[in-house]
Amino acid sequence: MITLNGTIQRKFYFPADLLTTLIYFSDLSRVTYLLPHISVIEAYSSDRVRIRYQTVELGAYTINIICDLDSVTDLDKHEIIIVPLSDCSEVTPEATLNATTAYGYYTSTARLFPEEDGTGIDYHFEFKSSLLRPRGLRMMPKRVIDRIAQSISLGRVEEIAEGFMENAIEAFDDWRADQPRDLVEQWLAARGREPVDAQGRRLK
């Protein structure tokens, strides 16, 4: 087996006010497209998706991990929490000569807070999976398997975190240009919340 357990924590600065940033990142079906090495297989709703993590390791072996995700936005705490989506059909592990596929578990937490003229984001995520060895690796020594596991658990996880924020910042201006001027007010009203200022403070 190839056992993966990757985790990372980062702090980022995002160039928008707190509530606009919260709205931007709260649509899971859209922002998952910004994650490197990850594609959306199916969007069940705006906050529930099935994704595929895919990379090629050692130049020859394709790693596929399927995850079902559920996103919850906490307006009071300014948090976005992503957890495994329950009641989904897991993928049966399988391996070919140069590929392996299995089900995985992804969780993340983003805590937002005002910072200078924008928003600070404390971001933590973790994913786990156990994969069958591709047949081409079955005779390989354990150190080769450990190298693949370490590459994904450490290097690839960092690529996802760093690339995600770079892609999110790059895509933000186009997204914001397509939104109504009263985006925050509409978003709050749809959730039965009172108007607040850009930093989340209730207006009198």
Image (cartoon, grey):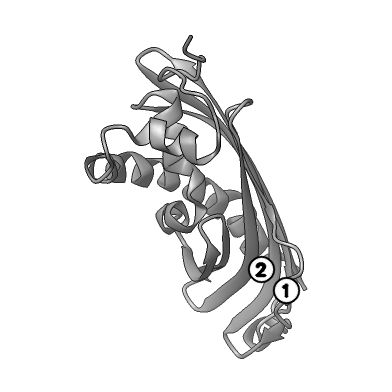
Q: Residues within 10 Å of mark 2 (few under 14, many from 20)?
A: few
How far is the residue under mark 2 from the one under mark 1?
6 Å
Does dot 1 land on a helix, a strand or a loop?
loop
Question: Dot 1 corresponds to which residue?
Answer: 141
Give the residue type that dot 2 points to.
Answer: Val
| Residue 135: % across, % down | 67, 88
Q: Is residue 155 left or right of residue 16?
A: right
- Determine contact: label 2, label 1, CB under 8 Å: yes
Residue drawn 63% across the image and 59% down it = 69
Evaluate whether residue 151 shows in this view. yes
Residue nearer the viewer, 134 or 16? 16
User: Where 77 sits versus 192, above or below?
Assistant: above
Residue drawn 49% across the image and 41% down it = 190
Q: Quadrant of residue 21?
A: top left
Evaluate whether residue 55 shows in this view. no
Residue nearer the viewer, 144 or 67? 67
| Residue 52: % across, % down | 55, 69
Question: Dot 2 corresponds to which residue?
Answer: 144
| Residue 40: % across, % down | 48, 67
Residue drawn 50% across the image and 44% down it = 26
Residue nearer the viewer, 26 or 193? 193
